Amino acid sequence: MSLLELAGVHRSFSVGGGLFGRKRLLQAVNGVSLTVARGEVLGLVGESGCGKSTLARILLGLLEPTGGEVLLDDRPLAAHGRREIARRIQPIFQDPYSSLNPRKTVGTIIGLPLEVQGRADAAARRRAVEDMMDQVGLARRLYHNYPNQLSGGQRQRVAIARAFVTRPEVVVCDEPTSALDVSVQSQILNLLQDLRREFDLTYVFISHNLAVVEHIATRVAVMYLGRIVEEADTRELFRAPRHPYTRALLDSVLTPEPGLGVPDTHLGAAYPNPLDPPPGCAFHPRCSMALPECRVTVPAAARDAAGGVACHLYVSSGDRLIRRPT
Amino acid sequence: MAPLLHVEGLRVDIPTPMGMLHAVRGIDLEVAQGETLCLVGESGCGKSLTALALMTLLPQRALRGARRMDFGGRNLLAVGEREMSDLRGDRMAMIFQEPMTSLNPAYTIGDQLEEVLRRHRRAQPGEARERAVFLLEKVGITGAAGRLSQYPHQLSGGLRQRVMIAMALMCAPDLIIADEPTTALDVTIQAQILHLLKSLQQEFRMGMILITHDLGVVARVADRVAVMYAGEIVESATAQALFGAPRHPYTQGLLRCIPVPGKTPPGERLGVIPGLVPAPIGELSGCQFRNRCDHARADCAAPGPRFVQVRSDHAVRCVLAQ
């Protein structure tokens, strides 16, 4: 059974056109169907503006979808009540500088979710917070410190402790290590892995760093302009990407191997303007393999055992996906 | 042939309420024509201040010192502010990390590009405009002529960074200093921008100093690499030598910290460097990495260690190599 399920989720924003301008509709999430199974780490990758952070906020119940449904345990998310959602699904955000209240102490920040849940008295709360601080590797003497007295890595540990203190089932990590130095990033990734094993957690892990996603995710979904264009088990996706966009993303990863030079991704045109998306497959202006129908119709997702892909190059045949000859 | 840039003993000191912050502590740099030197290190290691010191763009309270700072046959230590501002943007140019804050929001792209040529070459408007369009096309911006009348906020991050690169190239400089030019960008755009920088560099035979914390970028772009820690260069080598056989424990640690696709087993613990980067304030002596180092021993605290040549293309500052 899936823990979380998105069924045809849409989310649009009305973007103001200034004083006399006309309001326009931006489709940030455009019909996303996705399941998150208990115990998996679902990696969500894509370029800025592809809608991955909007999707994260929908999963957290912070944003209502304008269409489609979000299900938690097969019941609509909204039916669960804000407090229950907050107890079961917690976020870790990218920027440990702006996601912590600068006027609250470390102890207060980590303890706040417990307070909101109305759990335990002050003394028990303090014990729970200190236990959590031990677990994320924060010295207890920092309990009364303020965020500005901490390093970036320590702040991200505070954010992690705050997310884990209510023992959630799902943690939505939105670029949790992007703002950190290399040596700190590896500490935080190790910590997230350890905590997942310890608490038997499910992660939705959003990142533009594909090396990190390959390392931590068990399954990966690739987003492009509000849609999921490919989804597969991590190993499969990195071994044999199907969608031309996934391939271009993987080609762009600069591994620390000297002598290989910088790859030419052949992605000529720039990322499209989300206010004015191309017709048909949104990727076709940048795709070197585009077919005539790519300019006209949006490809439907086709699935087989290995995963799913939304691309005109693939057709279903029984329970398999076949690549059309070009 | 003399190198394009030759720096010895560069220091940057910043007075703080806690004492003198030794941000850059006596580093030597050489960049030849057409060569790419990567300065790599974590936040606070002094790599960005090194760049600003080379450009004479340090914040006012920062103090710069050096035994030698030669650029294209000129002694930068003896150059006055006026002559320096003639050099900047003309013979040496800088590309900053955040193109949103380094472009002026009140002027069009065209104004800002053309000004470089008018300022340094007293170019006529038509000539400056022609060069701007030529370079915008060169950096892969479509509809270049139409872009000239746009303001920075009308462009995406990737386009703004391309505009920054075009601006740096307006006078065909001898040296480009790029400080984390792709850190704020998506991977696909990063690959495109770096690909572009490398091909333009080869075309115009520019020297380049590229500052980054991303070891993947370093491996793919650098001819030579200098690893910085706490204001010092702790290891310097060709990219091949550094990634093939890193000698300094800090470099080795950094390389273990990053997951490498196809090499790091998924889900396995990554390497860590325990502890924190020290703040280089007050009297410093010995190896600054020793408190985080697995190989540390008593003599690591002694003055030094010297920078030792372990091979012709590889030098390291560590007692293990002495």
Image (cartoon, coloured by chain):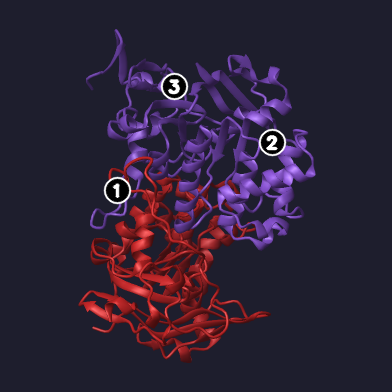
Chain colours: A purple, B red
Residue at image position (46%, 31%) is: A42
Q: In the figure, is residue A67 to the left or right of B35? A: right
| Image height of B301 relative to A311, above or below | below
Element at label 2: loop
Q: Earlier in the sequence, mark 3 or mark 1?
A: 1
From this viewpoint, is residue B105 visible?
yes
| Amino acid type, mark 2 | Gly
Q: Using the image, tell me which numbered label, if any, was put on residue A280.
A: 3
Residue B231 rendering spot, x and y as whole percentages: 47, 76
Residue A64 rendering spot, x and y as whole percentages: 67, 24
Q: Earlier in the sequence, mark 2 or mark 1?
A: 2
Q: Which sits in the foreground, A184 or A141?
A: A141
| Amino acid type, mark 3 | Gly
**Spatial distance from mark 2 to mark 3, Cα to Cα?**
26 Å
Q: Which residue is mark 1?
A: A263
Residues indicated by labels 2 and 1 sit on the same polypeptide chain: yes
Element at label 3: loop
Closer to the eye: label 2 or 1: 1
Q: Which residue is mark 2?
A: A17
Chain designation of label 2: A
Q: Which sits in the foreground, B273 or B103?
A: B273
Residue at image position (70%, 56%) is: A143
Image label count: 3
Residue at image position (46%, 38%) is: A271
Quadrant (top left/top right/bottom left/bottom right) for the C terminus of chain A = top left
Residue at image position (73%, 47%) is: A126
Q: Which sits in the foreground, A227 or A278?
A: A227
Q: Which sits in the foreground, B260 or B94?
A: B260
